[in-house]
Image (spheres, rainbow, N blue to C red):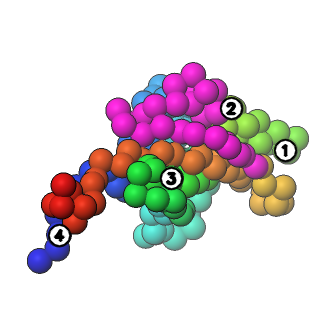
Amino acid sequence: MAEKIAGYTSEMCQQAMIDELTELFRGMTFGGQESPKPLQIFKQFLPIQTTDDDEADTNDSPYPCIIVIESSGEQDNEHDPQLVLLQLVICCYDRGIDRQGYVDTVNVKETIMQHFKRKPIFGGAFEVSYPRKWELSDDDADYYYWGIVNLICKTPNGLKNEEVEALI
């Protein structure tokens, strides 16, 4: 039988980030394949494509989107919080021949960066700490513009060493 999970987990942090971003981008639209559309937010991976490529240039496409990836973590000792690296992979879409579609990606990135500067606590328990890094892709992927925001999030350490506690 699996042991019951106590305290906060990295997956809870990931889900809280998804909830935060969903609320942050509510009501906003970005360039879509057929018309402006809301940003979709996915957990860990893009959904597996179940149809043929006919949807690639329709608003049924998953783009624009953010993929919230739980990438890695560390905890230096039993007293410190677990640090979770969440990678927010941004992809926007624009068919313009002037190749200015990256601007939507930059705007999504800036919205995220400015939001967590003003409100670093999310999900009632997690905190975005520093450093906060971002990067834009310079790959030549026609119509698709990629960026990434790396956020190190503190996950509260609510657990105690039960062996030590039993001795006290």
Q: Residue furthest left?
A: 1
Q: Who is closer to the viewer here, 140 or 151?
A: 151
Inter-mark Cα distance, 4 to 3: 22 Å
2 or 4: tag closer to the N-terminus: 4
2 or 1: tag closer to the N-terminus: 1
Q: Residues within 10 Å of mark 1 (few under 14, many from 20)?
A: few
Query: Residue 83 shows which numbered tag?
Result: 3
Query: Residue 99 shows which numbered tag?
Result: 1
Q: Is residue 70 visible?
A: no
3 or 2: tag closer to the N-terminus: 3
- Depth check, mark 3 against mark 1: the one in front is 3
Q: Read off the residue under disc 4.
A: 3
Inter-mark Cα distance, 3 to 1: 37 Å
Inter-mark Cα distance, 3 to 2: 23 Å
- Dot 2 amino acid type: Glu
Q: Who is closer to the viewer here, 9 or 60?
A: 9
Question: Which residue is rendered at x = 57% and y = 30% of the image?
Answer: 116
Q: Where is 38 relative to 53, above or below?
A: above
Label 1–label 4 contact, CB within 8 A:
no
Query: Residue 110 shows which numbered tag?
Result: 2
Element type at mark 2:
helix
Element type at mark 3:
strand
- Depth check, mark 2 against mark 1: the one in front is 2
